[in-house]
């Protein structure tokens, strides 16, 4: 079994190499973030006191930290991206008008063989930041961070509610009720009617089967046969509690959707935009779908319609906006944007040989949204769908999805930054492009070998009498 090895982190510079580098931030500070305390190091203090101090992580301690940094004349601060530990500290520094730089822990590693303590770590971060050796990680603006927190919370609630659906299915299986075999979704119209009737005391399979919706593909007799089971009080109790918890999660998700809608309305662009054309729905509504018109709200917040791109639905567009924001100038080029997402090859070359060209490992939520959108194009008759299927036949499904997600990322970048409208094309256009490329390569290869290629016109078929 082949195991994919993670790439080695960048080597930290030696102290001798640091001394020869020019100073870029003279009034800098370095912070080693922790759960209970933060260690802070500055270059000098006005009263000659120690340049390294420890501050508690609670709110009064953060106020004391900010006051000490101002007393020392600090203008820019570097800290590690350590999850929730450093998030509140970063926002506090930004609100205090400091130039806060949150960097990846891979760039703040100590040199091998040297002792490692919190005090030494903050001093090392200070030295690296003084010479401008700490690249910042992406941090969206305040409005995007609020939206990101809402959307991530919504995703967690959807996943938690899915667990209760699985528990309902398990309780039905333990009672030998084969409802999942005749109904595609137990939380659909037919499934919920039958579940609620069972919990009210109905045990007649024929009466339960009559609750089927007219759009259900299975007949009444088939559903009645599947609902002839063994009812047990302990499993009925589990079914009742799981259904109640699932419905409660739906109520909380609906309340959160209202907060997301009100927040998006505050980010509406002041400039007038042309009305959004109507778009037909490709599927019915699901219980977890937002209860407001996400497409219209996002259109007036960004100025573009992301759902016009094949594969990107309302949920994908909402996720991309919450993770990326509307300011795409933070990535100077589309190649840097694709590299940040981890959707392009990362070459590891030494001695003239390529050792690895895998994409970068990571848990980028925007990249996951692009991959899900690409997977939805597997049966699409569009240009991107034809490209995905051809790449799957050549490279396999995982690499084909990554390649198609890379194309979607380039389209979204050009649309949001430059306003380049997306032109829809069908699979016939892609087939013609592939044929043109093959003919061009064939002519070039024949010319290199000293041959000449001529196109043969096939005779037209003679109509049969």
Image (cartoon, rainbow, N blue to C red):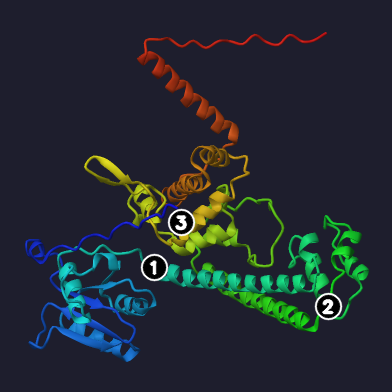
Where the C terminus falls, by quadrant?
A: top right
Callout 3 secondary element: helix
Callout 2 secondary element: loop
Q: Could you say which is closer to the camera, residue 178 or residue 65?
A: 178
Residue occupying the point 80% across, 10% down: 464
Dot 1 surroundings within 10 Å: few (below 14), some, or many (20 or more)? few
What residue is disc 3 on?
A: 367
Q: Give the x, y percent position of residue 324.
A: 43, 60
Q: Alpha-carbon distance for marks 2 and 1?
A: 55 Å
What residue is disc 1 on?
A: 141
Q: Which mark is residue 6?
A: none
Apparent side of residue 298 relative to residue 349 in the rendered image (left or right): right
What residue is disc 2 on?
A: 231
Q: Given contact means CB atoms under 8 Å apart, are the residues at marks 3 and 1 in contact?
A: no
Q: Alpha-carbon distance for marks 3 and 1?
A: 19 Å
In this view, which residue lies farthest toward the front? Answer: 1
Q: Could you tell me if residue 316 is visible in this image? A: yes
Q: Could you tell me if residue 270 is visible in this image? A: no
In the rendered image of this protein, does residue 69 appear above or below residue 7? below
In this view, which residue lies farthest toward the bottom? Answer: 60
Dot 2 surroundings within 10 Å: few (below 14), some, or many (20 or more)? some
Q: Give the x, y percent position of residue 1.
A: 45, 53
């Amino acid at each position: 079994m082949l195991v994919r090895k993670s790439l080695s982190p960048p080597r930290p510079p030696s102290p001798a190499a640091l001394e020869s580098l020019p100073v870029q931030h003279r009034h800098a500070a370095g912070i080693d973030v922790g759960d209970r305390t933060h260690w802070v190091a500055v270059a000098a203090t006005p009263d000659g006191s120690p340049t390294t101090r420890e501050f508690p992580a609670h709110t009064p301690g953060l106020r004391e930290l900010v006051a000490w940094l101002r007393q020392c004349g600090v203008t820019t601060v570097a800290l590690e991206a350590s999850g929730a530990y450093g998030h509140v500290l970063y926002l506090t520094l930004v609100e205090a008008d400091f130039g806060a730089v949150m960097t990846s822990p891979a760039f703040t590693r100590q040199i091998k063989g040297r002792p490692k303590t919190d005090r030494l770590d903050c001093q090392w971060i200070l030295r690296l930041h003084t010479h401008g050796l700490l690249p910042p990680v992406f941090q969206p603006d305040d409005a995007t961070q609020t939206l990101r927190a809402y959307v991530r919370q919504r995703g967690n609630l959807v996943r938690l509610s899915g667990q209760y659906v699985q528990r309902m299915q398990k309780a039905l299986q333990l009672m030998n009720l084969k409802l999942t075999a005749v109904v595609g979704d137990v939380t659909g119209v037919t499934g919920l009617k039958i579940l609620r009737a069972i919990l009210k005391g109905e045990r007649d399979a024929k009466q339960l089967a009559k609750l089927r919706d007219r759009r259900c593909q299975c007949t009444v007799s088939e559903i009645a046969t599947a609902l002839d089971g063994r009812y047990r009080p302990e499993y009925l109790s589990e079914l009742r509690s799981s259904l109640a918890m699932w419905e409660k999660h739906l109520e909380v998700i609906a309340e959160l959707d209202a907060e997301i809608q009100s927040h998006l309305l505050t980010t509406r662009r002041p400039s007038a935009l042309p009305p959004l054309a109507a778009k037909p729905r490709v599927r019915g509504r699901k219980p977890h779908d937002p209860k407001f018109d996400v497409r219209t709200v996002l259109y007036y917040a960004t100025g573009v319609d992301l759902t016009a791109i094949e594969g990107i639905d309302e949920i994908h567009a909402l996720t991309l906006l919450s993770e990326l924001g509307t300011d795409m100038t933070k990535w100077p080029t589309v190649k840097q944007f694709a590299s940040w997402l981890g959707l392009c090859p990362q070459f590891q070359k030494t001695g003239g040989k390529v050792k690895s060209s895998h994409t970068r490992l990571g848990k980028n939520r925007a990249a996951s949204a692009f991959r899900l959108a690409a997977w939805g194009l597997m049966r699409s008759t569009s240009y991107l769908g034809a490209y995905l299927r051809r790449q799957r036949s050549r490279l396999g499904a995982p690499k084909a999805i990554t390649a198609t997600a890379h194309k979607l990322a380039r389209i979204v970048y050009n649309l949001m930054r430059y306003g380049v409208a997306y032109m829809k094309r069908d699979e016939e256009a892609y087939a013609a492009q592939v044929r043109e490329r093959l003919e061009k390569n064939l002519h070039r290869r024949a010319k290199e070998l000293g041959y000449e290629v001529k196109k043969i016109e096939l005779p037209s078929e003679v109509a049969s009498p």
